[in-house]
Amino acid sequence: MMVQKSVGTDSVKRLGSREAQTHLDKLFEKFDKPRPVHLISTGGTIEFQWNRKKDCMAIGSESVLPPYIQSLKPYTTFDFTTVCLKDGREITQKDRRNIRDTVLASSHERILIAHGCFTAPDTAEYLLDELPANHGKTVVVFGSKDPFAELLSEGPFNFGFATACSEILEPGVYVSMEGRIFRAGEVSVNSTRAFEEGAITADEAQQRLDSIFGKLNKPETLHVVRTGGTIESRWEPTLDTAVTDVNPWLQIYLERIGLQLKLQFTTACLKDSRDITYRDRKQIVEAITSSQAKKVIVPHGTYTMADTGQFINERLPEDHDKSVVLFGAMIPLNGFVPSDAPFNCGFATGAALVLKAGVYVAMNTRLFNAEDVEKNRSEGRFEEAENQ
């Protein structure tokens, strides 16, 4: 039986923030005003939980995704449907029909489908064949090789990446895994459990170059500039609080989950963001400007993230070619489940791969112009700045 419910909600030139809004490209506008998402769960490893009676990991009777979504304090409205909760290898033809019918019946243009990895390409291709032409929906199938609730799971990253991609991809059916988007019918899982694409023609490769799909499909170099903050903190029992950890947990995490991206890492500083100095911010800018990569993400403490974003925007040359996305977390990446850190990192990565040159902040399932954002500390949420 299908169960449905609703979950959660509620630039780049150096101009005044409101004035800058009219100059922002269409991609930013989509990220800035996110459309509702219909999230459909079918089970798979992503839904595995510890079963005390069986003394092993197993798919539970309820999805783990709705409570996690609420913890993000999202700007995006998520409607949620459970079609089935099965190992992907046990998905039947009737299950796929129910998935198809749920997609067709949805009032939303953005559809995310959580699915077991092994047969995600099969379900995606079935939807590609069965959905009517011009159905007008962007359908993104994603999964995880780790249970969502496991420490340092790739599941929240994949969820965040798929959420970002669903906002800006053209209508169609896609598979999102390993930091890359594939078209349904062109992707398979190989013997090492990696997702891969079949050969494409030279003409097709040329057509993809400047497309949104092409930017998300081609493995790109992503430069991660570390600054510290809660996202890379650890719990210190002697102080009864979280403190910045010198261990490169974000690097460990991103290398562990097997992204099909070329990763570069630079440590500009490792501090509580309230302790970041003028010189630290100069170091951050230096790391960005000296990088060969055009796509840069900056994990940062949430207290002064907006200040650092505005400093970067001020200091980068007018003609720079960098897409810089700052993000952070309210809960540390390591040692805490659930944490918003992996989702925010996945969302920031997806945004950075497609955005035009500029400086942005990605938090709470939304993208902000760095000149037009502030943290509402009482709400624990980012929002447009009141003082324009």
Image (cartoon, rainbow, N blue to C red):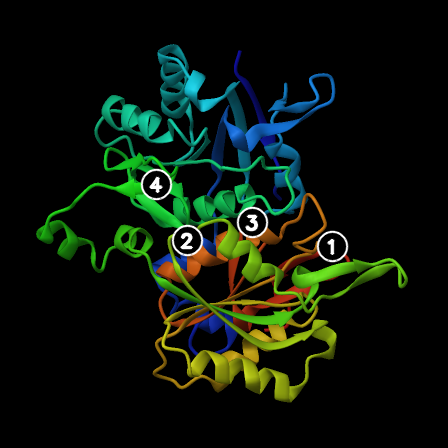
Q: Which residue is mark 4?
A: 195
User: What residue does disc 1 label?
Assistant: 379
Going from N to C along the chain, the mark reached first, 1 or 2, is: 2
CA distance separating discs 2 and 4 = 28 Å
Task: Residue 312: give x, y in percent of width and height.
Answer: 52, 80
Residue placed under numbered mark 2 in the picture: 30
User: What's under tag 1, amino acid-wise?
Assistant: Glu
Of the two numbered discs 1 and 4 on the same chain, state the one appearing first in sequence: 4
Figure quadrant of the C terminus? bottom right
Q: Give the percent coordinates (x, y) of residue 84.
A: 50, 18
The residue pinned by badge 3 equals: 343
Tag 1 near tag 2, CB within 8 Å: no
N-terminal label among 1 and 3: 3
Secondary structure category for the residue under label 2: helix
State the separation of the CA atoms marked 1 and 4: 39 Å
How would you rate the neighbour count of disc 4 (Cα within 10 Å): few for under 14, some for 14-19, many for 20 or more?
many
Taking the spot 42% from the left edge, 32% from the top edge, the residue there is 117
Q: Are marks 2 and 4 in contact (CB under 8 Å)?
A: no
Tell me which amino acid carries mark 3.
Phe
Total marks drawn? Answer: 4
